[in-house]
Amino acid sequence: MLILGGDGYLGWPTAMHLSACGHEVAVVDNYLRRNLCREQDCDPLFPVPNLHQRTAIWLRLSNHRIDVTIGDLRNWEVVANVFQRFQPDAVIHYAEQPAAAYSMLDRQAAALTLRNNLEVTFNLIQAVRTFAPHAHIIKLGTMGEYGTPNIDIEEGWIDVEHKGRSQRFLYPRQASSLYHTTKIMDTDLLWFYVRVWKLRVTDLMQGPVYGLTTSESERDERLQPFLNYDEIFGTVLNRFVVQAAANYPLTVYGKGNQVRGYLNIRDSMTCMRLAVENPAAQGELRILNQFTETFSVNQLAQRVHDVGRKLGLDVTIKPVENPRIEAEEHYYNPAHRGLLELGLTPNVLTDDVLAEMIERVLQHRDRIVPERFLFGIRWS
């Protein structure tokens, strides 16, 4: 299993999880996320060892070796070298600039997002075609590709009848940021090459992920993933949890009625393993909607408020002007049958899960920098 972007919030836990399940694993990363965090002064809550250090810790604890390459996957020589040396059966693609807010920061950030995300995807496709034509590509997409249409969101595909004729199409996409737009372009690139070169592809449309630990990282705190809590790289529930720990008002954008599908980081690992171990067919673009529960921003804020208060924290909720251009009142009913049918048993968001997250963050409370919660990045 070759994991592109193996240093990230999801890439590193995936590497450990698949390794623990008996798969041979290699990771590639160029520390783009770490560098961008430093540039924007939004380092994660606690320091994270580099990949060589993490894999050494993991080897001592598990006796499982993870191969590491540090290199830029926009560079074809790096990609070709890794593919020829490792000969992957499956390639998991996390290697993208992952933040909607960063992609809307300025022209330079937008250009980096566009170039990095599309060029890495293109190089991956070319490398599979050239060096591993039967390898299964698993690309991490996002539910944000769909937007918030006023009809039910199907699992990647929709059957259309028009003037007495019918055809199956990719479900229409309408992203709300440049980052999400690059993910749509990824899907279109993969669909083109699936049709032309009969690639084997699974596209996982993932909702926002929350959580700090997996069963593998519980063995040593140094194996935990990044926990970004800032406006740029922090996902909404992780950000609310850190705000609660800091007695900082939970910043709800606009009306707070924006609904999305969420999942625990443990479920994200399980979904990836299920996709790996149940590959798509040759010449198939399989799309799976990857989330377990839907919540509005207000519902998440209220849940964190109530649990935080029970823990003795002075948690308040404060609506702020929405910096994004998005529907704040909308219909939202996405399908998500595929991963359940493959065997996913969801970890739902309980009060105990929230309390455990808050208590872990409280251990690093002195490292919280409140100025990072709001940078003032606007879509308009």
Image (cartoon, grey):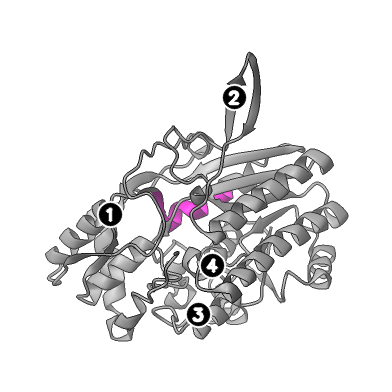
**Total number of numbered discs in the rendering:** 4
| Magenta-drawn stretch contains 124 | no
Q: CA distance from mark 1 to mark 2?
A: 33 Å
Residue type at the position of mark 2: Val
Q: Which residue is mark 1?
A: 256
Q: Which residue is mark 3?
A: 37
Return the residue nearer the eye: 139 or 6: 139
Quarter of the picture containing the C terminus is: bottom left
Front tag of 3 and 1: 1
Front tag of 4 and 3: 4
Mark 2: give few (<14), some (14-19) or many (20+) Cα within 10 Å.
few
Magenta span dominant secondary structure: helix
Q: CA distance from mark 4 to mark 3?
A: 13 Å
Describe the element under mark 3 as helix, strand or loop: helix
Q: CA distance from mark 2 to mark 4?
A: 33 Å
Residue type at the position of mark 1: Gly
Magenta residues, as a range?
Answer: 261-273
The x, y position of residue 292, in whole percent, is: 40, 44
Q: Which residue is mark 4?
A: 103
| Residue 67 image-quadrant placement | bottom right
The x, y position of residue 296, in whole percent, is: 30, 49
- Residue name at image x 30 percent, y 81 percent: 370
- Of all residues shown, which one is farthest toward the right? 130
Mark 4: give few (<14), some (14-19) or many (20+) Cα within 10 Å.
many
Q: Which residue is mark 2?
A: 160
- Of all residues shown, which one is farthest toward the front? 380
Quarter of the picture containing the N terminus is: bottom right
Return the residue nearer the eye: 356 or 156: 156
Query: Looking at the image, do the residues carrying marks 1 and 2 touch, with CB atoms under 8 Å apart?
Result: no
Return the residue nearer the eye: 141 or 22: 141
First reached walking from the N terminus: tag 4 or tag 3? 3
